[in-house]
Image (cartoon, grey):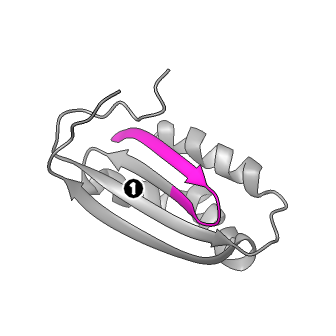
Amino acid sequence: MSPFAATPAAPYYAVIFTSTLSGDDAGYAAMAKRMVELAAEQPGFLGIESAREEIGITVSYWRDLAAITAWKANAEHREAQRLGRERWYGGFRLRIAKVERDYGLD
């Protein structure tokens, strides 16, 4: 299995979430796993790639902006966002980008 998301031909959208952890990681791994499972159930979800060292970087791929907006509004995702702000994240940035080209070597 490839570590890369199997995205369709461009264009599509990428949500880039970068974060640092606060040190209170109780429940974080379980919630992160649940969010990947839940995102995969959402209409318009295309895939995800993630890595964590000093800074965590998660890139999720979506068919369009409407799918991203619906994901942001998902009730369970909203609760995870609240807990992230209150407990888990020392800081974070979220960026949304339109992918115009996609190529590489698997």
| Above or below, comparing residue 85 to residue 52 in the picture | below
For this orientation, the residue located farthest to the front is 105
Query: How dense is the environment of label 1, judged by Cα within 10 Å: few (below 14), some, or many (20 and up)?
Result: few
Along the line of sight, the residue nearer the viewer: 102 or 69:
102
Overall secondary structure of the magenta section: strand
Whether residue 96 is situated above or below residue 45 in the rendered picture: below
Query: From the viewer's perspective, is residue 94 above or below residue 66?
Result: below
Residue 78 in picture, x, y percent from top left:
57, 64
Q: Position of residue 57 (x, y in %)?
A: 51, 58
Determine the residue positioned at 57% across, 69% down: 19
Residue placed furthest toward the top? 1
Residue 33 image point, x, y percent: 66, 44
Percent coordinates x, y for residue 41 in the rendering: 49, 36
Per the image, label 1 sits on a secondary structure element best described as helix
Residue type marked 1: Ala
Which residue is identified by label 1?
70
Bounds of the magenta segment: 44-57
Left-right relation of 22 to 76? right
Residue ID at (26%, 44%) = 63
